[in-house]
Amino acid sequence: QVPLVESGGGLVQAGGSLRLSCVASGSILSINSMAWYRQAPGKQRELVADITIGGSTNYADSVKGRFTISRNNAKTTIYLQMNSLKPEDTGVYYCKYSTPIRAYWGQGTQVTVSS
């Protein structure tokens, strides 16, 4: 089990920004894609953004133009830059690394946006 460790969550006012990070503490081979998901209270976990190993990105409609996913050159760390945050962005944010064999999840980091 290779843990993924998220950081950067917190409490921010609407309109503010946060930057989330996700670091793989060990070696993960054959990564296909890396992604950020979120889960709001009482709701299902949903995809926020993902990035392929080739660098192609995809965003949920609700965050397009406000959030940016990126990764480091070593492909061990991903980031989520979140700007113009809204109260509806509140939730626990999880990172996920996918390989042909399995997916790895982080433990989650809380993001709370106050109005």
Image: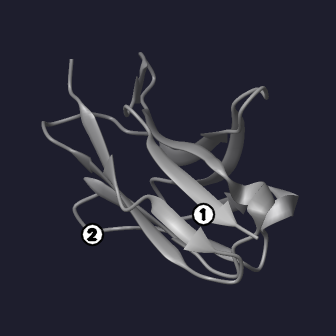
Q: Which is more toward the observer, 115 or 66?
A: 115
Q: Dividing the picture into quarters, in which one does residue 40 lie?
A: top right
Q: Is residue 85 above or below residue 91?
A: below
Cα distance between the residues tagged 2 and 1: 14 Å
Q: Dividing the picture into quarters, in which one does residue 58 lie?
A: bottom right
Question: Dividing the image into 4 quarters, which one contains the C terminus?
Answer: bottom right
Q: Amino acid at mark 1?
A: Ser
**Left or right of residue 2, residue 50 in this image:** right
Can see residue 94?
Answer: yes
Q: Residue at x 68, y 51 (%)?
A: 48
Q: Count neighbours of disc 1 (C-alpha within 10 A) and say few if under 14, some if 14 to 19, many if 20 or more.
A: few
Count of numbered labels shown in the rendering:
2
Q: Amino acid at mark 2?
A: Asn
Q: Is residue 80 above or below residue 91?
A: below
**Left or right of residue 42, residue 101 in this image:** left
Q: Residue at x 71, y 32 (%)?
A: 41
Q: Is residue 38 above or below residue 67?
A: above
For label 2, the residue is 73
* Residue 3 point in image, percent of width and height: 23, 30
Check residue 56 in the rendering and tell me which mark sits there, or answer none: 1
| Among the two numbered marks 2 and 1 on one chain, the one whose residue lies closer to the N terminus | 1
Q: Is residue 81 above or below residue 31?
A: below
Q: Residue at x 27, y 42 (%)?
A: 5
* Residue 37 point in image, percent of width and height: 61, 42
